[in-house]
Image: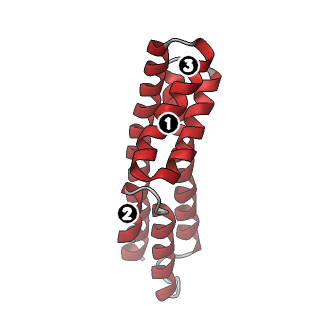
Amino acid sequence: MLVGILGVIVPGLPGTVLILAGLVWLAWLDDFARIGPGTIAVLVVLTVLSYAVDFVIAALGAHRVGASRRAIVGAALGTIVGLFFGLVGVLVGPFAGAFLGELTTRGGVTDATRVGLGAWLGLIVGFALKLSLVFMMVGVALAAFLLA
């Protein structure tokens, strides 16, 4: 689970999946006596939500500042492509995708920069959301384990 939490911070590691696997392993060790199927289902939903946040939030950030459709798609694609380039890719990908999408639509560097910054700010908000989902996962599991 600790490697999973690190994986939420460091790109390239499947953080929430590792946390889920650790929690399921903990439940299995206890014969699912305290962490049962209902809790596991909640943890799976939180894991899926954390990945949805990754792919959607940068595009929403770009949309919030009035981005064109092409810029929003660019932000989403930039997020996906950025995952393959480590920390720098994750930080630059959404900005670059939104920037290029807006630049090819409207052609203005000022608008494209504003949209790129919106995508990047969306990424920061998404990171905070994902981190809160991770702590919710751990909290749900701990509550189930300690209160059973």
Q: Is residue 48 left or right of residue 6?
A: right
Q: State whether residue 9 is above or below residue 128.
A: below
Element type at mark 2:
helix
Looking at the image, which residue is at 51% across and 46% down? 82
Looking at the image, which residue is at 41% across and 26% down? 117
Q: Which residue is mark 3?
A: 103
Q: Of the numbered discs in the image, which one, if any, rests on residue 5?
A: 2
Residue in the foreground of this view, choosing between 139 and 104: 104
Mark 2 Cα within 10 Å, few/some/many (few <14, many 20+)? many
Query: Mark 3–mark 1 contact, CB under 8 Å?
Result: no
Give the Cα separation between the discs numbered 2 and 1.
22 Å
Q: Of the numbered discs in the image, which one, if any, rests on residue 94?
A: 1
Q: State whether residue 122 is above or below residue 86.
A: above
The N terminus appears in which quarter of the rendering?
Answer: bottom left
Give the Cα separation between the discs numbered 3 and 2.
36 Å
Dot placed on the residue nearer the N-terminal end, 2 or 1: 2
Looking at the image, which residue is at 42% across and 77% down? 148
Looking at the image, which residue is at 48% across and 22% down? 115
Dot placed on the residue nearer the N-terminal end, 3 or 2: 2
Element type at mark 1:
helix
Q: Could you say where residue 144 lies in the image, as x and y percent from the top left?
A: 43, 71
Q: Quadrant of residue 71?
A: top right
Q: State whether residue 121 is above or below residue 48.
A: above
Residue in the foreground of this view, choosing between 50 and 34: 50
Query: Mark 3–mark 2 contact, CB under 8 Å?
Result: no
In the rendered structure, which amino acid carries the disc numbered 3?
Leu
Q: Nearer the viewer, mark 2 or mark 1?
A: 1
Query: Mark 2–mark 1 contact, CB under 8 Å?
Result: no
Residue in the foreground of this view, choosing between 141 and 59: 59
Q: Nearer the viewer, mark 3 or mark 1?
A: 3
Give the Cα separation between the discs numbered 3 and 1.
14 Å
